[in-house]
Image (cartoon, rainbow, N blue to C red):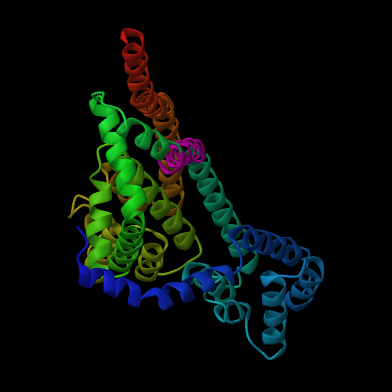
Amino acid sequence: MVSLPQMLTGFQRLPALWSSWRSGVNRVKAEDRYLLVRQLYVLHRAGVPLLSSLSALEAQVPAGVLKRTLRVMSQDLLGGSTLSQAFAHHPRSFDPLFIGLIKTGEAGGLLEEVLKRVADLTEWELELNAKIKQALQYPAIVLATLLAALSIMVVFVLPRFAQFFGSLAIPLPIQTRLVLAFTWLITHYGWLLGLGLVGGIVAWYSALQTDRGRLWWHTRLLRLPIFGPLFLQLGMSRFARTVSVLNASGLPMLETLALAGQTINNSYIQSGLTKVAERVRSGQTLAKALSVDGLFPPIVIQMVGTGEETGRIDELLQHVADYYDQQATFLIRKLMTYLEPALLILVGCGVLLMATAVLIPMWDLVKVFQTT
């Protein structure tokens, strides 16, 4: 249960949350980043200078955040900045992995190849997010519809029945008394419940902004009976794909692990990668460093060990990423197979509860009238 000090602390963080929301609004969307990098790759491959490429793209895109960003980047290039430095001036739109890859491509003379890898990695992220959104779309619509129907019943319909049933001397069934009690609670103390709900959400969000709170929550997510394996598979896929791209681009392993940790959305896996980087820095091989904590599955360790022996770690990690993508897709489909009937049962139970809470007293009332 959220305490009063936590609620007060959460409300104090509202300005920071508002600023964070505005930062998210004023950044380049993932779809626009993908199109930008893909077109930069095509233009650079055709021999078009970077400044001309940015000017051409700025003229094509509609007014918005991307157009303003391209205009500023063109001015940075005119001022003598490199492409990676121009991207680095917009940290809300381009993450450290993105900037690090561009910088590596510039330093090694492999900008064209790196742009293609960045585009492929961004495309994979878009496809993954699309799969997750598609999996959550149906449950969200069903639950929102059920919540809206129950809210209309509780706020507008049931209070009238409560007044009607209260004037009658007939015993009410347990489900009717529970629904009427809940209706009375909402109509009299709904504002207080809403305030407590908002305060709890803000306090919870504030706790997740701390390293300790985020680590605790992400650790619990990986231990969930059904969704935990899915979160782990997604994390391993992102780790393997990112390390594969960075290693193929020529980044040192320590820098690769640091950037890979920033791309993973789970603090527990991030902390594990930090420990792995410390062991690699002390002289251990990557496979040995991954096998200590038991966080990384055997297939990842075996592929990394084989890759280190053969000098093909980027290729083998790409296969690992594809494997976990397939596993995650299969698990999402399996969850949706079980989730659809579960949602139908939930909706049926909600409708049955409301129907019996209203119809059974009405039926008892008809029997009373018939006997009289």
User: Is residue 299 rendered magenta in the image?
Assistant: no
In the displayed structure, 332 sits above or below 97; it is above
User: What secondary structure do most residues of the magenta stretch adopt?
Assistant: helix
**Residue drawn at (48%, 41%), measured in percent from left and top?**
148
| Residue 119, image x, y percentages | 61, 58
Q: Where, quadrant-wise, is the N terminus in this rendering?
A: bottom left
Instruction: Please indicate whether residue 85 sits to the left or right of residue 226 in the image.
Output: right
- Point out the residue furthest to the bottom here: 79
| Residue 46, image x, y percentages | 78, 63
Q: Nearer the viewer, residue 251 or 3?
A: 3
Q: Is residue 59 visible to us here?
A: yes
Q: Where, quadrant-wise, is the C terminus in this rendering?
A: top left
**Residue drawn at (62%, 69%), measured in percent from left and top?**
111
**Residue drawn at (43%, 35%), measured in percent from left and top?**
332
Name the quadrant containing residue 267. Answer: bottom left
User: Is residue 148 rendered magenta in the image?
Assistant: yes
Instruction: Please indicate whether residue 80 sits to the left or right of residue 339 in the image.
Output: right
Q: Nearer the viewer, residue 60 or 49?
A: 60
Q: Nearer the viewer, residue 135 or 357?
A: 357
Instruction: Please indicate whether residue 306 sits to the left or right of residue 92 in the image.
Output: left
Magenta region: 137-156
**Residue drawn at (40%, 44%), measured in percent from left and top?**
320
| Residue 64, image x, y percentages | 71, 70
| Residue 283, image x, y percentages | 22, 68
